[in-house]
């Protein structure tokens, strides 16, 4: 079970998730502190009121705008999951690459405080008692997630090719 | 069934006879661009090689471009340190297409790339910047990726697990009225498609309104295609593409150009009557303080407003 800790609308941009003024930060370990820096939610994160595994619920086109992967990294740093009606392409890919849990759930209805049970096939809103189908990720993206992210996935390929060249 | 221009480019880059929307491919990269965020890419690149016992060497230093343009001059010691680290990396790896903060070679990445002849029709271009879509103006398949994805490109020379996108065909008929520009055309199209209407798709531009448009306008169309969520915008190469390559960059490669099949499959077709378009203005911008009165507008509106001091119709 995972609690909905933040409810957002459509077209949440990477600028809202991770404002551009913090872009000089290149160490993933320093990125979590700027998560939704301009929302009150940031203070709740800093006060450690948001347990790992909590869920952000959003509408369509979550993560639109810039290609900055700090937006996925900052959410991953807090071990949050995002359940959205839809995601912008680059953000969805960055999430798979970095191991941020993203769930595409086009018909989801939930509000802050609801308890969700998320499986590969569906999201069950335990508070409202309603169930919503999940759109599975394509296998090629799931493969990256299953490898533990793109670093590990690419490392295996680099080793494989070095082996062939030898 | 024939192929769209991007399907043809991806088939060639992944050494397959044909691909179709929804397939997954690993296309070879012809040009990999980063700006200041190369510092994060370097970080992730080193991570890939961690524990492998292999030297972290980029696959082909002649195909990597790094341009400082987002934080010029450095606004903080953090940025200055990042830029210094990138300079060291560029030297150590032998990256030649590096544009530092200098009046003779510096500039905005999406202008530096075409103006230096780095972008060729039919090539695969990736950049750690969402507006990498720009370079479709020259008939390349050009799209934005994240820093870790770029690190994998630096290591392997190809993009891993790329889903072949579906393509929206946009046909622009007629010519734009006086005072109305490519920027107005693309803002109109984004309004029609919505901010996510082209998500996971490519916008392929056609029609006499495109054929008569100079490359500068096409760069604007493709640059902003991402604002409709598009993976890329692309203009199939034509006489204007050859003129630009030859006159602006001295490229006369005589290569056969990749254009879409007449029977290519499109997810939808949108027709635009250019003559009916008007100047767009006053979209809320995303730069600066969120409480400031900042607007995204056509360059003509910006120029006219600069003269008058209030938001002004350039006509």
Image (cartoon, helix red, strand yellow):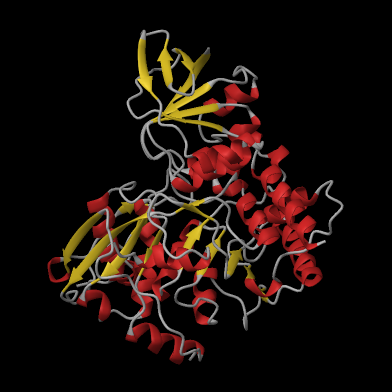
Q: Residue at x 44, y 63 (%)?
A: B133
- The C terminus of chain A sits in image quarter: bottom right
In the rendered image of this protein, does residue B238 appear above or below residue B6?
Answer: below
On the image, the x and y values in percent for residue B29 come to 57, 66
On the image, the x and y values in percent for residue A98 come to 62, 40
In the rendered image of this protein, does residue A155 appear above or below residue A122?
Answer: below
| Left or right side of B282 for B151 | right
| Left or right side of A91 for B208 | left
| Residue projecting furthest to the right | B53
On the image, the x and y values in percent for residue A21 come to 58, 48
In this rendering, the count of numbered labels is 0
| Left or right side of B58 for B234 | left
In depth, the one of A152 and B135 nearer the eye is: A152
In the rendered image of this protein, does residue B275 appear above or below residue A166?
Answer: below
In depth, the one of A103 and A145 nearer the eye is: A145
Asked whether the viewer can see residue A71, the reply is no
Q: Residue at x 53, y 63 (%)?
A: B14
| Left or right side of A83 for A108 | left
Asked whether the viewer can see residue B17, the reply is yes
Name the image quarter holding residue B241. Answer: bottom left
On the image, the x and y values in percent for residue B43 come to 74, 51
Name the image quarter holding residue A123. Answer: top left
In depth, the one of B240 and B262 nearer the eye is: B262
In the rendered image of this protein, does residue B274 appear above or below residue A50?
Answer: below
């Amino acid at each position: 079970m995972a609690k909905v800790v933040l409810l957002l609308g459509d077209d949440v941009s990477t600028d809202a998730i991770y404002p551009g003024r913090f872009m000089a930060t290149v160490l993933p370990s320093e990125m979590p502190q700027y998560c939704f820096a301009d929302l009150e939610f940031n203070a709740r994160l800093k006060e450690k009121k948001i347990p790992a595994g909590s869920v952000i619920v959003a509408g369509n086109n979550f993560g639109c705008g810039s290609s900055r992967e700090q937006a996925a990294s900052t959410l991953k740093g807090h071990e949050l999951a995002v359940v959205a009606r839809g995601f912008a392409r680059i953000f969805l890919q960055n999430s798979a690459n970095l191991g941020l849990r993203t769930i595409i759930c086009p018909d989801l209805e939930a509000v802050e405080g609801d308890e969700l049970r998320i499986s590969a096939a569906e999201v069950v809103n335990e508070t409202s008692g309603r169930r919503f189908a999940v759109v599975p990720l394509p296998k090629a993206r799931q493969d990256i997630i299953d490898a533990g992210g793109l670093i590990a996935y690419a490392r295996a390929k680099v080793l494989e090719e070095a082996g062939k060249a030898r | 069934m024939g192929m769209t221009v991007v399907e043809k480019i991806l088939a060639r880059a992944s050494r397959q006879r044909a691909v179709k929307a929804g397939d997954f491919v690993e296309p070879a990269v012809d040009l990999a661009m980063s700006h200041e965020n190369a510092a994060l890419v370097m970080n992730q690149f080193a991570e890939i090689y961690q524990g492998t016992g292999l030297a972290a060497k980029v696959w082909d230093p002649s195909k990597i471009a790094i341009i400082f343009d987002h934080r010029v001059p450095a606004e903080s010691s953090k940025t200055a340190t990042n830029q210094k680290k990138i300079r060291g990396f560029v030297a150590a790896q032998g990256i030649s297409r590096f544009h530092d903060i200098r009046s003779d070679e510096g500039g905005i990445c999406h202008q530096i790339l075409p103006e230096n002849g780095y972008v060729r029709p039919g090539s695969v271009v990736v950049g750690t910047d969402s507006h990498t879509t720009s370079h479709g103006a020259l008939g390349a398949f050009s799209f934005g990726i994240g820093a870790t994805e770029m690190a994998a490109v630096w290591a392997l020379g190809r993009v891993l697990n790329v889903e072949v996108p579906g393509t929206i065909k946009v046909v622009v008929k007629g010519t734009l009225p006086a005072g109305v520009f490519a920027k107005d055309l693309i803002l109109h199209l984004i309004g029609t498609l919505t901010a996510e209407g082209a998500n996971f798709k490519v916008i392929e531009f056609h029609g006499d309104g495109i054929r008569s448009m100079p490359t500068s306008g096409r760069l604007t169309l493709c640059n902003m295609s991402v604002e409709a969520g598009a993976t890329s915008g692309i203009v199939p190469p034509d006489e204007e593409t050859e003129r630009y390559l030859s006159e602006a960059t001295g490229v006369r490669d005589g290569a056969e150009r990749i254009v879409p099949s007449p029977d290519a499959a499109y997810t939808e077709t949108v027709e635009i009557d250019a003559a009916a378009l008007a100047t767009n203005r006053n979209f809320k911008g995303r730069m600066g303080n969120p409480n400031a009165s900042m607007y995204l507008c056509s360059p003509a509106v910006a120029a006219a407003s600069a003269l008058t001091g209030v938001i002004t119709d350039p006509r």
